[in-house]
């Protein structure tokens, strides 16, 4: 293993120990067709079949995003949704601050079960965590005020998710944010008409993170 890969592995393992969780894509949890493609495992549960393979953001970058969200004046009232939560790494990092609630949405039941277990056993949890199993485009979004997305699916599902969010905002007008990590389909968000680009940043390894907002 190259030195950079070894350091990344050690860094991840140290953070897993810190939180008392296991979120790495091994032990049968990868749900990947190919390591050279974003394509995820085909499943009838996906409305459009454009679900991407299981991946996890780096802990350093996640804490940077968490801290940015925590500085918001309304942070204690925020309900954070992770759309495509996998085994719950994002959920656990976010739940280490006392947000109102953290909600994961995961297509695969085995990953969702792992996320629930990680949320149950994690060290330092300060927010309640709920994990829903299903396609993100079909899950009710009315509770959410912050939505996190790590390139979990392609443009068709993203379009449907944004349409669902637009309907939710019509029923229940409120300020919302979308944090789009590894933003591969920003044009879909822009074309949706329900969110405006507020900021764009890059992670230490060069992935784009875009921040979108909707005022009440």
Image (cartoon, rainbow, N blue to C red):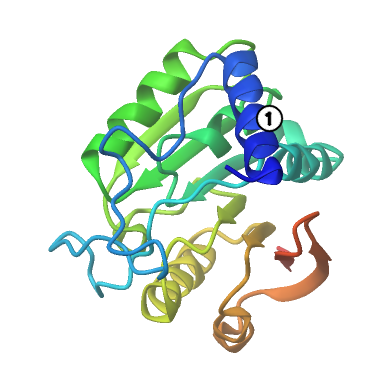
The quadrant the N terminus occupies is top right
Helix, strand or loop status at disc 1: helix
Asked if one can make out residue 214 in the rendered structure from this viewpoint, the answer is no
Q: Residue at x 70, y 45 (%)?
A: 4
Q: Is residue 30 above or below residue 138?
A: above
Q: Nearer the viewer, residue 14 or 80?
A: 14
Quadrant position of residue 127: top right
Label 1 belongs to which residue?
A: 11
Label 1 crowding class (10 Å Cα cut-off): few <14, some 14-19, many 20+? Answer: some
Asked if one can make out residue 143 in the rendered structure from this viewpoint, the answer is yes
Q: Residue at x 50, y 45 (%)?
A: 143
Q: Residue at x 58, y 54 (%)?
A: 147
Q: Position of residue 120 (x, y in %)?
A: 43, 15
98 lies left or right of 107: right
Number of marks drawn: 1
Q: Nearer the viewer, residue 142 or 5?
A: 5
């Amino acid at each position: 293993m190259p030195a950079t890969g070894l350091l990344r592995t050690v860094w991840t393992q140290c953070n897993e120990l810190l939180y008392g969780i296991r979120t790495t894509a091994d032990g049968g949890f990868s749900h990947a067709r190919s390591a050279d493609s974003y394509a995820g495992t085909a499943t009838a549960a996906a409305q459009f079949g454009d679900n991407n393979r299981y991946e996890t953001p780096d802990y350093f970058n996640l804490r940077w995003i968490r801290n940015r969200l925590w500085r918001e004046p309304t942070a204690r009232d925020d309900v954070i949704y992770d759309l495509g939560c996998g085994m719950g790494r994002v959920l656990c990092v976010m739940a280490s601050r006392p947000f109102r609630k953290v909600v994961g949405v995961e297509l695969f039941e085995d990953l969702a079960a792992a996320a629930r277990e990680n949320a149950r056993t994690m060290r330092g949890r300060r927010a309640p965590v709920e994990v829903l199993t299903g396609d993100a485009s079909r899950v009710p979004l009315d509770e959410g005020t912050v939505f996190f997305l790590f390139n979990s699916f392609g443009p068709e599902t993203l379009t449907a998710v944004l349409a669902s969010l637009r309907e939710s905002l019509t029923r229940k007008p409120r300020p919302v944010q979308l944090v789009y990590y590894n933003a591969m389909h920003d044009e879909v968000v822009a074309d949706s008409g329900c969110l405006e680009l507020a900021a764009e940043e890059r992670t230490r390894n060069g992935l784009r993170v875009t921040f979108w907002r909707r005022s009440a």
